[in-house]
Amino acid sequence: MHLAMGEAMNTSKRIKSPRRIVGKICQSLARFSLAPSFLRVPLYRMLGVNFLNPKTVFIGEDVYFDDSRPDLVTVGSWVRITTGAKIFTHFFDAKFIPEKDRPFRFYEGEVKIGSYVFIGANVVIAKPVVIGDWAVIGANSVVASDVSPFAIMVGSPARQVGTRMLDPHLQENTVN
């Protein structure tokens, strides 16, 4: 079942399909093993995360991709996701009025990480967002809105504190 952005999902009846169980095993191996980064990316691909160019992506230890809908995450080329980052595709609806048999409601949406992006340690991506090419997200930041290309973001919630500068020749040859 695929829900469009803004549609509610019912998480009270989780399906324990073989694919989900295999995904949890892959997630555990990638997060907590001594596996080097070049093994983590294939494990996350088996979980369902989309990588544009997996051979160019570095994923640090204890990185978590939401296992409820990992297929909603896309990671560009030459991306660095460092230790402890958490990337979620489902989100709590704080405006939902609880019902007797349904005390919570969640939404799901896509997370798109552009190319040449650096995501610092313990960053949380907590909403459906697009992170533009060449962006830098500082350690311990919480990303809850779109990030412009070249933006340097820090804080909780993350806010832009600078703009990443590139050699003009490099910029012409790498940004679409």
Image (cartoon, grey):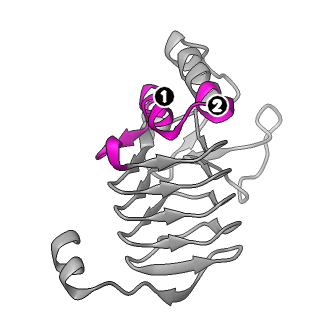
> What stretch of residues is rendered in magenta?
29-56
Q: Is residue 73 above or below residue 35?
A: below
Residue at 65% across, 51% down: 83
Q: Is residue 28 above or below residue 172?
A: above
User: Which of the two residues, 37 or 1, is positioned nearer the viewer here?
Assistant: 37
Q: Is residue 77 above or below residue 13?
A: below
Residue at 80% across, 40% down: 103
> Which quadrant does the N terminus fall into?
top left
Depth check, mark 2 against mark 1: the one in front is 2
For marks 2 and 1, give the CA distance: 13 Å
Residue 90 visible in the displayed image: yes
Residue 8: quadrant of the picture: top right
| Residue 38: image location, x then y, percent | 44, 37
Disc sitting over residue 43 in the figure: 1
| Residue 77: image location, x then y, percent | 32, 54
Disc sitting over residue 34 in the figure: 2
